[in-house]
Image (spheres, grey):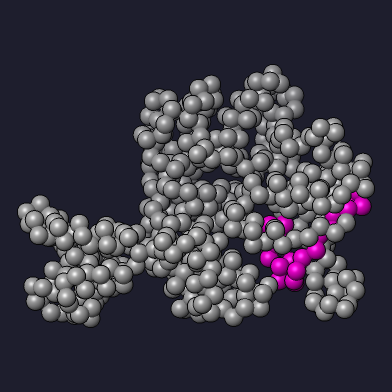
């Protein structure tokens, strides 16, 4: 299913900006009496397209619209913690959304519940707090206005300031990508990594990493012309430039940057004219020694419906991947994120979440957000039982539970009639060695754990031992019918 692009809060050409009555913002400002719930629903439609489903359900669904006086929208929040979280993480998104729907001068005010007593009037159980971070006025893109002469000197910095290298957790899954990104950020356009293409499944931190490049470049040189965009936004701006006869301005704008960062280039597929424009833009920047950074959900050579000449240029520099994080990296992410939010969670809670949520960093963080929300909003104890409840909700069902090393040990030891403890012992008995090698082989095949991580679960053996065990089983599969049948049986049993 094709991924839909988030609504652009900065473009004046967004279709949500107008309505049948002649414009959402104008109608909302002029019709003060319009139902506040309907107005808030419009805001939520935009927010929903710009955050994950887990974040939307945990935070935004719990907000309650109270009043709209034609200038200020008042929203009720369930607690002080809730207010502080929203202001720390989503204040800019909320404020821009409200201004988009209700007009450029619209502001936010929160009613924060401080007393849940049932027989107290609403005014007495809440306090009024302003939206602390109203957005700065967003500049029009340079090609949106008639322009003569050289390329523009100002580029809007659409960078999330929280996306830095300092808070990006490095692990074996992303070490090369991180090192390359830092090298590019320290010396843009002057390294052999041009373009730098980072690819991998969604939710693993590609956007964080490339935004960290932009943030570091701007931190070191405030005059640098750094632009972050995505292929869908590039396409829409190109179409608008054609419709408004501003192709020259569009071309000058994109060819005037020092660093161009384009997210999700896979969505260029099938858009021939856009690809042609991007091809010439790429050539102009590369020849001028400017830095290009691209992300994709797959390797350039595997991109569908993308011109071969573009794919060839994507491969000129360095192409690196990001894999799902191993257990140790997931633990580090959870520890860092929980401390950032002011909570030192129990080790067994973090370990359980890290072992059972493995597909993406985004899902891992969503699980942690839900856990913290339950603790703070529902006054739940930060227990292992609560962690299990949250994980079940994220995974959807027990059948999607992540396979662990302990699962593999239990299945293999039972199959070969060996004590589990012997798998980590130093014994060299053939029966035990075979069971241990089978465990290591299946762990490498069926989990995302690194060789080093697997070895630690078997008496602290190093990665070379794990590699040797995997190769031994592979040799057996080619030459021993019995071992081949064992592997087939155990794999099916574990995948059930």
Q: Is residue 496 left or right of residue 179?
A: left
Where does the image place residue 222, in percent across and percent down from the top left? 63, 47
Q: Nearer the viewer, residue 36 or 157?
A: 36
The region drawn magenta spans 68-91
Residue 72 is inside the magenta segment: yes
* Quadrant of the rendering where the C terminus is positioned: bottom left
Res. 170 image quadrant: bottom left
Vertical position of residue 28 compared to residue 418: above or below: above
> Going by the picture, which residue comes out furthest to the top?
245
Q: Nearer the viewer, residue 148 or 427?
A: 427
Vertical position of residue 288 compared to residue 472: above or below: above
Where does the image place residue 162, in percent across and percent down from the top left? 60, 58
Q: Is residue 480 visible?
A: yes
Q: Is residue 263 left or right of residue 414?
A: right
Residue 60 is inside the magenta segment: no
Where does the image place residue 211, in percent across and percent down from the top left? 55, 49
Where does the image place residue 371, in percent across and percent down from the top left? 57, 70
Residue under the point 73% across and 53% down = 94
Q: Is residue 442 left or right of residue 148?
A: left
Q: Nearer the viewer, residue 300 or 64?
A: 64
Q: Is residue 365 visible?
A: no
Vertical position of residue 485 compared to residue 465: above or below: above
Q: Is residue 147 left or right of residue 197?
A: right
Residue under the point 59% across and 32% down = 234
Residue under the point 14% across and 74% down = 432
Q: Nearer the viewer, residue 443 or 133?
A: 443
Res. 330 image quadrant: bottom left
Q: How many marks?
A: 0
Residue under the point 50% across and 22% down = 272
Res. 28 image quadrant: top right
């Amino acid at each position: 299913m094709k991924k839909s692009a988030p609504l652009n809060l900065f473009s004046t050409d967004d279709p949500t900006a107008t309505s049948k009555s002649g414009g959402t913002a104008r109608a909302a400002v002029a019709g003060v009496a319009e139902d506040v719930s309907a107005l808030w629903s419009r805001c939520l439609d935009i927010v929903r397209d710009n955050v994950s489903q887990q974040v939307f359900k945990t935070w935004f669904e719990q907000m309650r619209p109270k009043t709209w006086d034609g200038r200020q929208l008042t929203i009720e929040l369930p607690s002080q913690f809730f207010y502080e979280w929203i202001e720390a993480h989503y204040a800019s998104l909320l404020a821009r959304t409200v201004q988009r729907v209700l007009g450029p001068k619209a502001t936010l005010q929160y009613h924060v519940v401080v007393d849940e007593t049932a027989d107290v009037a609403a005014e007495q159980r809440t306090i009024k707090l302003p939206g602390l971070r109203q957005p700065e006025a967003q500049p029009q893109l340079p090609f949106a206005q008639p322009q003569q002469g050289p390329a523009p000197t100002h580029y809007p910095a659409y960078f999330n300031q929280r996306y830095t290298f300092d808070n990006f957790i490095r692990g074996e899954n992303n070490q090369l990508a991180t090192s390359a990104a830092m090298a590019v950020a320290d010396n843009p356009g002057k390294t052999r990594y041009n373009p730098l293409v980072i690819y991998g499944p969604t939710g693993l931190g590609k956007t964080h990493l490339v935004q960290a490049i932009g943030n570091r470049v701007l931190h070191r040189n405030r005059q640098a012309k750094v632009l972050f965009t995505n292929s869908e936004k590039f396409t829409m701006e190109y179409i608008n430039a054609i419709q408004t006869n501003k192709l020259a301005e569009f071309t000058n704008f994109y060819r005037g940057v020092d660093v161009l960062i384009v997210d999700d280039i896979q969505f260029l597929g099938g858009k021939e004219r856009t690809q042609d424009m991007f091809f010439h833009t790429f050539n102009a920047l590369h020849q001028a020694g400017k830095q290009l950074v691209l992300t994709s959900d797959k390797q350039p050579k595997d991109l569908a419906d993308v011109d071969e000449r573009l794919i060839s240029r994507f491969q000129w520099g360095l192409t690196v991947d990001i894999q799902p994080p191993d257990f140790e990296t997931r633990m580090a992410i959870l520890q860092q994120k929980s401390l950032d939010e002011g909570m030192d969670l129990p080790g067994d809670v973090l370990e359980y979440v890290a072992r059972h949520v493995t597909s993406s960093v985004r899902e891992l963080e969503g699980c942690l957000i839900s856990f913290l929300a339950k603790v703070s909003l529902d006054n739940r104890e930060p227990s292992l039982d609560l962690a299990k409840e949250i994980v079940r909700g994220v995974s959807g069902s027990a059948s999607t539970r992540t396979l662990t090393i302990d699962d593999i040990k239990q299945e293999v030891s039972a199959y070969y009639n060996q004590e589990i403890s012997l798998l980590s012992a130093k014994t060299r008995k053939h029966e035990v060695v075979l069971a241990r090698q089978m465990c290591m082989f299946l762990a490498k095949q069926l989990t995302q754990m690194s060789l080093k991580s697997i070895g630690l679960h078997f008496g602290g053996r190093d990665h070379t031992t794990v590699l040797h065990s995997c190769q031994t089983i592979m040799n057996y599969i080619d030459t021993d019918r019995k071992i081949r049948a064992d592997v087939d049986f155990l794999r099916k049993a574990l995948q059930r």
